[in-house]
Image (tube, rainbow, N blue to C red):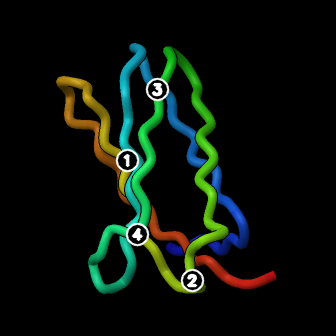
């Protein structure tokens, strides 16, 4: 289910061990429009993704980690004007 956002979106993740994560936004045509690398620390992590440079539309957020366990998540995000 898409979640509306304007300028930014927060991605909250819990990880058991520190690791690197790549956050990718994909538009409705399947093109990567943003890629952001983040270092996750053990426990809860709150990552802010800036949407200011994106056009209004629906985007998928994909989070991939370098963990040996496959930790990929996919969320839909709607960017809209305030």
- Residue 11 in the image: state x and y as whole percent: 57, 47
Q: Which of the two labelled residues, at mark 4 and mark 2, occupies the earlier sequence position?
A: 4
48 relative to 21 in the view: left or right = right
**Residue at point 18% right, 24% down?**
68
Residue position marked by numbered label 2 in the rendering: 55
**Direction front: furthest residue:** 53
| Disc 1 from disc 2: Cα separation | 21 Å
Q: Quick check: 21 above or below 62? A: above
Q: Tell me the crowding category of disc 3: few under 14, some 14 to 19, or many 20 or more residues within 10 angstroms, Cα based.
A: few
Residue position marked by numbered label 4 in the rendering: 33
Camera sees residue 28: yes
Camera sees residue 61: no
Q: Quick check: 17 above or below 74? A: above
Asked whether the beta carbons under mark 3 and mark 4 sit within 8 Å of each other, the answer is no
**Residue at point 66% right, 69% down?**
52
- Residue 53 in the image: state x and y as whole percent: 60, 71
69 relative to 74 in the view: left or right = left
- Residue 43 in the image: state x and y as whole percent: 54, 18
């Amino acid at each position: 289910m898409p979640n509306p956002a304007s300028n930014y979106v927060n991605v909250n993740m819990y990880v058991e061990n520190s690791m690197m994560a790549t956050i990718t936004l994909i538009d409705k045509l399947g093109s990567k429009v943003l890629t952001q690398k983040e270092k996750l620390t053990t426990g809860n992590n709150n990552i802010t993704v800036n949407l200011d440079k994106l056009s209004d539309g629906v985007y998928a957020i994909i989070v991939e980690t370098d963990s040996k366990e496959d930790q990929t998540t996919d969320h839909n995000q709607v960017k809209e004007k305030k």
